[in-house]
Image (spheres, rainbow, N blue to C red):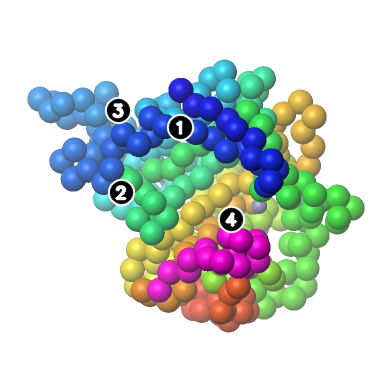
Amino acid sequence: MTELRFNELRGEQVDYAIHRQERTFLPDRAHCPLDPTRAGMPATEIPFPAFEIAVFDNRFPAFVAPHGAAEVVVYTDEHDGSLASLAPERAEALMWVWRHRYLELGARPDVEYVFIFENRGVEVGVTLHHPHGQIYAYPFMPPVPALESAADQRAGGCAPCVLLAEELRDGRRVILENDALVAYVPWAARWGYEVHVVMREHRRSLIDCSGEELRLLAVALQQIVRGFDALFERPFPYVMAVHQAPTGERAHGGHLHVEFYPPLRTADKLKFLAGSEQGAGVFISDMLPEDSATALREALARAS
Ligand SMILES: [Zn+2]
Ligand SMILES: [Zn+2]
Ligand SMILES: [Zn+2]
């Protein structure tokens, strides 16, 4: 069903999931597969007339047991809206759902890394508009977490802890703080409006967080997405990546943080990954993180 091939030149796995060609592509509202199943109507992916949060195996999986997993997490049974427009209790409940999936998938022997993420907007390839995210449980350690693990080695400890302390000392790129976490545009952001949301305490994963920390994480994620939407007064596309400790047998390190990668540079200009980014791996940015942080702080204030 899926096949992994190792790309020697890049030293990374490529996943072939050919069946994904057939996946539902931007269906009209009446045929949304993430809606609840309504009386007298054809069944959707969710065989209930109403629900709060639904998790199920992706029907077009990039990974399947016993070689990982691919799940869909539907945030609400309401078709319109976003992470930002959920009731605060629902957003908080979503953190518990994430925690549960991390715990369960991470305990599987075939899973080395549990990756919770959301793609928002057609600009990042979304095929369904209904508010939802995804979880990939990789049967190997993916390159980005491996890079973060290498950063820990360079830091001689936890890199996110070190970087957070530096961002707080500098202060210019911080856009939001609460008792549990700090959000900032990182010193060397690759995307114009990249934001990292980092737990203040060294929490390896959602499992290590208190209930209050999970609640405050939900609050912050909603505030940030509202701020993004206020920035250009339009729904703001992004990739949201939840980074946590790897779960493989020899796993070490990890510090829960959420990274947002928005592709917009202006209200209508996209950042494309072109020659330098793709061919040499060097991001060229036309915005300084300090300036983006100022704009985002103002947008967050407008949105609140
Ligand atoms: Zn829907
Ligand atoms: Zn740490
Ligand atoms: Zn990260």
Which segment did they paint magenta? 269-283
The secondary structure type at the circle numbered 2 is: loop
Q: CA distance from mark 1 to mark 2?
A: 22 Å
The secondary structure type at the circle numbered 3 is: loop
Residue 139 showing in the rendered view? yes
Q: Which mark is residue 17?
A: 1
Tag 4: amino acid: Glu
Q: Label 2: how many residues lie within 10 Å, few (<14), some (14-19) or many (20+)?
A: many
Determine which residue is flagged by label 2. 129
Which quarter of the picture shows residue 179? bottom right
Q: Main secondary structure of the magenta part?
A: loop
- Residue 255 is left or right of residue 287, and the answer is right
Determine which residue is flagged by label 4. 259
For marks 4 and 2, the one nearer the N-term is 2
For marks 1 and 2, the one nearer the N-term is 1
Q: CA distance from mark 2 to mark 3?
A: 16 Å
Q: Mark 1, mark 2: which one is toward the viewer? A: 1
In front here: 298 or 131? Answer: 131
Q: Mark 2, mark 3: which one is toward the viewer? A: 2
In front here: 91 or 295? Answer: 295
Tag 3: amino acid: Ile
In front here: 259 or 277? Answer: 277
Tag 2: amino acid: His
- Residue 127 is left or right of residue 2, and the answer is left
Q: Residue at x 60, y 73 (%)?
A: 284
Determine which residue is flagged by label 3. 46
